[in-house]
Image: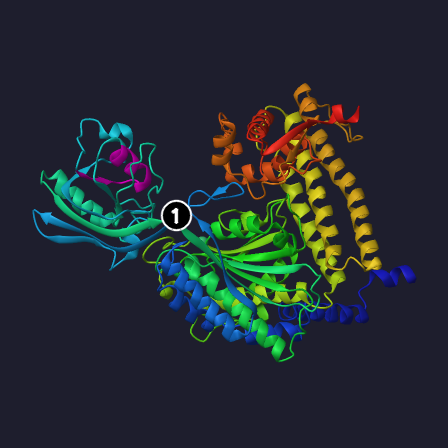
Amino acid sequence: MKKEASFSPSFSLIILGFFVALLWASSLARAEKDFPTLLPAKTVDAIIAHASGDIAYQHIRRISLFNRLAASEAYHRSAEYVLTELKKYGLDDAHIEQYPADGKTWYYMFQSFHGWDGESGVVWLVSPHREKIADFMEMPACLCRWSNSAQVRGELIYVGAGRPEDFDGKDVKNKIVLTSSSPGPVHEEAVFNRGALGVISFSYPRPLDYPDPVERDGISHYETTDGRKSTFAFKISYRKGQELLRMLEGGQKLELEVDVKARVYPSQYENVIATIKGTDPEAEEFLLTAHLCHFDPGANDNASGAATILEIARALKELIATGEIEPPRRTIRFIWIPEMSGSYAYAATHPERTDKIMCGLNLDMVGSYLNRNNSGFYFHLTPDSMPHFINDVVANFADFVGQTNTEFDYYSGYSFTKPILSGQGSRDSFRYKILPFMGGSDHRIYNDRLINVPMVFFNVWPDPYYETNLDTPDKCDPTTMRRAAVVAVASAVFITGPKPNCFALAGEVYGRGLARIGEDIKKALHYFNKGEFKDLETAYKEADNVVRFAFVREKKAISSVSLLDPQDASLSKYIADIARSYDSQEKRARLDIWNHYLAIRGEKKGKLESLKLSKEEIAAQDIIPFRNEKLRGPLGIRYVVTRGGMNPLAGASPIMRDERVIYEVFNFIDGKNSVLDIRNAASAEYSPIPLPDVQRFMEALAKAEVIRLRTASAKRQ
Ligand SMILES: [Zn+2]
């Protein structure tokens, strides 16, 4: 009877099934509305209500009017604009800080450069007919940075790509050269080596798609050893370049007149700094940074980031004033910088200040119309050498904004479940992704192990108008900026708040950590199919390595949660339990990889056998590199070559020459990892690196005294 009942579908079971289906359906619909954010829904709603994309857009319109190159007069004026707004919003301690930009001062491994102000610059074609070719007043991007004043007349001569061999049979002395390449190296060859007057370049990376933008550029501002100075270079559009070229190729003689007024001078980098003071002055701070610099207009790059963190500051002050959020326990620090130089100067001038920052966000290019420009909004996480909970705080709010602002919810039809739009902005879906680390902006400096401020990078890419005269405010979408602001404000409120829900965060880091480990296992198992390894055993060894380091990373990520509340013993215990659980999961996952390997070889499942190290690996395991504590920040290759005389990348394979790999090989140096560990960790993160590449790299760094090498076995004796 009992048995029979369990097999026949009774009425009650059908009813139950119906309710289950109903529950499932409603939970799907609810999943989008009640996305599990780390902050209470009421707080998130308040953040959305106060963060304004339209206000950020107003700042873009104003900031983009300044030709605000680092260490220039116009940069100073844009910095003053930001300062005035900060004072209006009532931020604490708002001020501008200056640092030498003189070509002599080094900030760690970064050499400062001179300031440059362009005043005017015009190129006229005077023969065979009169026509204006370029004018700084019309378009500041056309005059290359570090051009010097000049007043010359000369014949135009085409030198193609401008490599030394392209000059064969051409006399360019006292002439102006036209090139299809970037003007920097062509200027050196043509002006310094061959006596040309200056350079006109029509280089552009995507001329067939976009023939009309003018891409900004620069020439060297350093004097040659015999004291000669740079002259000038102009950029023109690809289309204009082709017109000139056709005339030259048609046998016409072109005469140009050039008039430049500009100055290269020892100047100052300027950072605008302000805070929202936390109630606990001892607590570590949270950082929001964006570079304010770049030539006019530079709307998306990076008036958008500068404008958005300004709006973030305003919205936070307002949320505190209305009582919708509690005053933060941790200080929230805002820094507007000239890109890279300002961050290096800030960190190098007072190392103790970056020691006090827990983590942060860098907003660089966050304003584009995503659909119209075929762009995506990307949240780039910290590198594997710096696992940190900041990644999962940002990912939580990014997913919330992304999933509630995309038309994929069956139950809500075509509308967003929680629309975050701006009155003057688009109604685009939020085309976003959470992606691994990428360099290219100031977070690269902060993520360095010795500076030790894990930072997530907000970035829209690609941008078809990147670094051109067409990067104007109309390309920027207030809706994109409002969404970026919501993610950033929510992250800041969670981390700096008086009582962050650390258990919720631990759950988030653990859950997302398992998903990342899953991705790593998938990557590892693909090593057996790729056919790029010399044999199956090598594929297995690298696959096992990927899985091993996935757990190293996630154990560090979960333990970082306790930094938020080190006093909470039950939190520490809970986190220690997760770390132990990872230990057993790691054994299981590595055994799975081993059995996969055995199955491919047609062998039966077996016990995990430890791999034998090669002689080279044993030697590399014995060498421990230590960073020079006085040289913080990412590696400067030029610094290493100048100081040690050895290029650390000479003869290196393509993988080792990847900018991200160089960064990580350097950043895994912690005084505990051996050369082999470092090679393995960076290989797990990217793809297998030949060990000799890493060994040669370390030798060059040691010669330049950027690191010291110690043998582990000698230490043990
Ligand atoms: Zn930028």
Q: Residue 330 occupies which quadrant of the picture?
A: bottom right
Magenta-colored span: 175-192
Position of residue 686 relative to residue 127, above or below, is above
Q: x and y percent of residue 194 in the render?
A: 23, 31
Q: Nearer the viewer, residue 704 or 128?
A: 704
Q: Amino acid at mark 1?
A: His
Q: Residue 24 occupies which quadrant of the picture?
A: bottom right
Q: Nearer the viewer, residue 583 or 275?
A: 275
Left or right side of 98 for 668: right
Asked whether the viewer can see residue 29, the reply is yes
**Callout 1: helix, strand or loop?**
loop
Position of residue 424 relative to residue 597, above or below, is below
Q: In the orientation shown, which residue stands out farthest toward the right?
A: 1
Q: Residue 607 occupies which quadrant of the picture?
A: top right
Residue hosting label 1: 114
Which color scheme is applied? rainbow
Kindly identify the residue that appears in the image at 74 percent across and 37 percent down: 590
Q: In the orientation shown, which residue stands out farthest toward the bottom?
A: 322
Q: x and y percent of residue 43 in the render?
A: 65, 73
Quarter of image, ligand 1: bottom left
Kindly identify the residue that appears in the image at 47 percent across and 31 percent down: 642
> Which quarter of the rendering shows the N terminus?
bottom right
> Which quarter of the rendering shows the C terminus?
top right
Confirm whether the magenta stretch covers residue 435: no
Number of numbered discs: 1
Q: Is mark 1 within 8 Å of ligand 1?
A: no
Left or right side of 666 for 261: left
Q: x and y percent of residue 275 in the render?
A: 58, 66
Q: Nearer the viewer, residue 26 or 589?
A: 589
